[in-house]
Amino acid sequence: DAGVIQSPRHEVTEMGQEVTLRCKPISGHDYLFWYRQTMMRGLELLIYFNNNVPIDDSGMPEDRFSAKMPNASFSTLKIQPSEPRDSAVYFCASSLGGQSNQPQHFGDGTRLSIL
Amino acid sequence: GENVEQHPSTLSVQEGDSAVIKCTYSDSASNYFPWYKQELGKRPQLIIDIRSNVGEKKDQRIAVTLNKTAKHFSLHITETQPEDSAVYFCAASAYKYIFGTGTRLKVLA
């Protein structure tokens, strides 16, 4: 299996621009998670989906952030408009079955820099 | 809200010595406790996990212990090697992962 695939690996853009991060979970996994990692705040859960349905988006910082999962093999995290404080590494992870008791497998992340 | 405290934040050990990282969680409903290793610039990778019905689990040089009463769990690495150098994260999960703040482990050759 190829694992969780994220794109792009790096993104540099100017503040105010729209940013779209993409994730392909491991085939057959029914849970998908978006995390943000910064030095100050560590690993934060932003949102997670079960069977393509958003279950908990309480970690989404602002209305500027949105996430979708149109099908079982694809999810996007969008920031519009982007701000410098959004600079971070964004990870996508997926797991199989009962969310709280199954290992989550992480993608390689997207390193986002907002200038 | 739920939180996980992790100590120490940095740890340096001589090659061959043991390393211990400790975590304390607040949500008594937590029933799954994974540990992740993250090398610089890479993704977190699961190294070991433990469920609430087990007190200890070992995998070669790595072991994890869980004390549900005290709400703490620990990672033990024996015979450390330079390639063990990384940041280690604990997590506690009731219905979602709550991560600790990480421990930067340096194994000195």
Image (tube, rainbow, N blue to C red):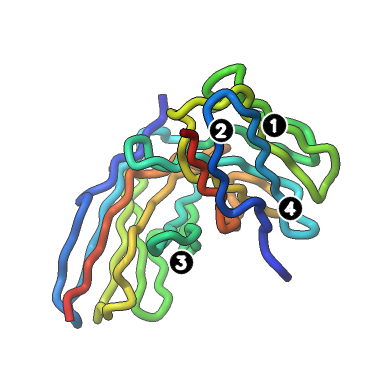
Q: Is mark 2 on a helix, strand or loop?
A: strand
Do the residues marked 2 and 4 share a common chain?
Answer: yes
Residue B100 higher or lower than B22, as above or below = above
Do the residues marked 3 and 2 share a common chain?
Answer: no
How far apart are labels 4 and 1 at the CA level? 13 Å
Find out whether the residues at labels 1 and 2 contact each other: C-beta distance under 8 Å.
yes
Mark before the other along the chain sequence, 2 or 4: 4
Q: Point out the frontmost of discs 4 and 3.
A: 4
Q: Is mark 3 on a helix, strand or loop?
A: strand
- Using the image, tell me which numbered label, if any, was put on residue B41: none
Task: Indicate the amino acid at tag 2.
Answer: Leu
**Which image quarter: residue A96?**
bottom right
Find out whether the residues at labels 2 and 4 contact each other: C-beta distance under 8 Å.
no
How far apart are labels 2 and 4 at the CA level? 17 Å
Task: Indicate the amino acid at tag 1.
Answer: Ala
Task: Indicate the amino acid at tag 4.
Answer: Lys
Q: Name the residue under label 4.
A: A24
Q: What element carries label 1?
A: strand
Mark before the other along the chain sequence, 1 or 2: 2
- Residue A101: x percent and y percent? 59, 50
Is residue A58 visible in the rendered image? The answer is no
